[in-house]
Amino acid sequence: MDEFGEAPLDPYAAPAEHDLETSLRPRTLGEFVGQQRVREQLELVLTGALRRGSPPDHVLLSGPPGLGKTSLAMIIAAELGTALRVTSGPALERAGDLASMLSNLAEGDVLFIDEIHRIARPAEEMLYLAMEDFRVDVVVGKGPGATSIPLEIAPFTLVGATTRSGALTGPLRDRFGFTAHMEFYVPGELERVLRRAAGILGVDLRPDGAHEIARRSRGTPRIANRLLRRVRDYAEVRADGAVTLEVARAALSVYDVDELGLDRLDRAVLNALVRSFGGGPVGVSTLAVAVGEEPSTVEEVCEPYLVRAGMLARTPRGRVATGAAWRHLGMEPPPTAPGEQPPAQVEDLGRGTLGTDRTE
Ligand SMILES: Nc1ncnc2c1ncn2[C@@H]1O[C@H](COP(=O)(O)OP(=O)(O)O)[C@@H](O)[C@H]1O
Ligand SMILES: [Mg+2]
């Protein structure tokens, strides 16, 4: 933890970071780095809608935290030139909460529901009708005397964001006309994110310094920007202010960010998997207990990146450490670890399910 009350590699924003994030958020699709496919598709959706003069289809943004979902929701409203109303799944506990939100929308507004997979059931059912027919049925009274009053709402665009698209019900998912799956960023893209942030923050970021920070940012722009601020502190206090390769390396080791950008929790998960469970397979909830974390944190925060980094494989029987994970912990992998060639029976390798990504 540092002065923001944040772990340096936590992909969620700490409350004290919100203002800083606002200043670093891209404002237009053109400023939004990476996610080439999503950007191109979204551009078509938005341009088509603008030409027709009607609100675009509802948009679902799915992917791990810190990849730019909230930024994209704001960009969608900005590109359409409309207002953005913001709420979240957990805030919509009762259908009435959603009804009042919906009835205040003006034509063409964008309604952003963050963490939409956590919306309560009654609100979700109300949302179906709202998304499809731009009306809701408000129930007045209780028991036999209850009546349902239909209420027209202005045509709007719903933008939902979720870290767990697998947890969305089918009917809700089906009502989105466009789903964007956000991918982890490659280091070159993160370098661009960093150069942009350095420009805004006035940091003297050298190319080799940018390269090093990008490489260790877990494929996540939010983390890249945060590491930049931590490295800048180091550069100003212990060096001449310039963020060079040497400064970046020295600073990142102070903050316990390892060579691959894995943080303490990532390493704890790998350690438990390898040392306590012989490399797996083991269920995600057992792993979570072993590292003292919520299963959802392990599943939504750690796992996607560990899979992407080739350290962990999801199999039908549970999570398995790859050969690369064993080596990263300084241990020799067993020949059965995914990614290892069993010396005797090479033809066994194509067992298929290893390494496939079942969620998302
Ligand atoms: N494509 C991008 N280009 C530039 N900066 C980005 C991009 N995506 C995210 N960021 C930065 O990362 C921060 C977190 O992004 P955010 O949209 O809040 O992620 P999410 O909602 O997916 O958790 C933003 O404040 C912004 O500074
Ligand atoms: Mg967000």
Image (tube, rainbow, N blue to C red):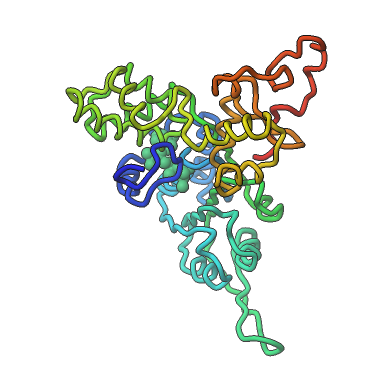
Indicate which quadrant contains ligand 1.
top left
Query: How many numbered discs?
Result: 0
Residue situated furthest left in the rendering? 240
| Nearer-the-camera pick, 21 or 340 | 340
| Nearer-the-camera pick, 104 or 279 | 279
User: Residue 129 location, x and y as percent?
Assistant: 65, 64
Q: Can residue 26 be seen in this view?
A: no
Q: Determine which quarter of the picture holds residue 320.
A: top right
Q: Is residue 322 visible?
A: yes
Q: Which residue is drawn at 69% across and 16% down?
A: 340
| Nearer-the-camera pick, 59 or 80 | 59
Where's the C terminus, which quadrant?
top right
User: Residue 112 location, x and y as percent?
Assistant: 49, 54
User: Residue 64 location, x and y as percent?
Assistant: 53, 40
User: Residue 300 location, x and y as percent?
Assistant: 57, 43
Query: Is residue 191 shown left or right of residue 41?
Result: left
Where's the N terminus, which quadrant?
top left
Residue situated furthest front in the rendering? 276
Q: Residue at x 44, y 58 (%)?
A: 85
- Is 289 placed above or below 253 here? below
Q: Determine which quarter of the picture holds residue 241.
A: top left
Q: Which residue is drawn at 66% across and 84% down?
A: 147
Q: Determine which quarter of the picture holds residue 32.
A: top left
| Nearer-the-camera pick, 327 or 110 | 327
Q: Which residue is drawn at 25% across and 35% down?
A: 201
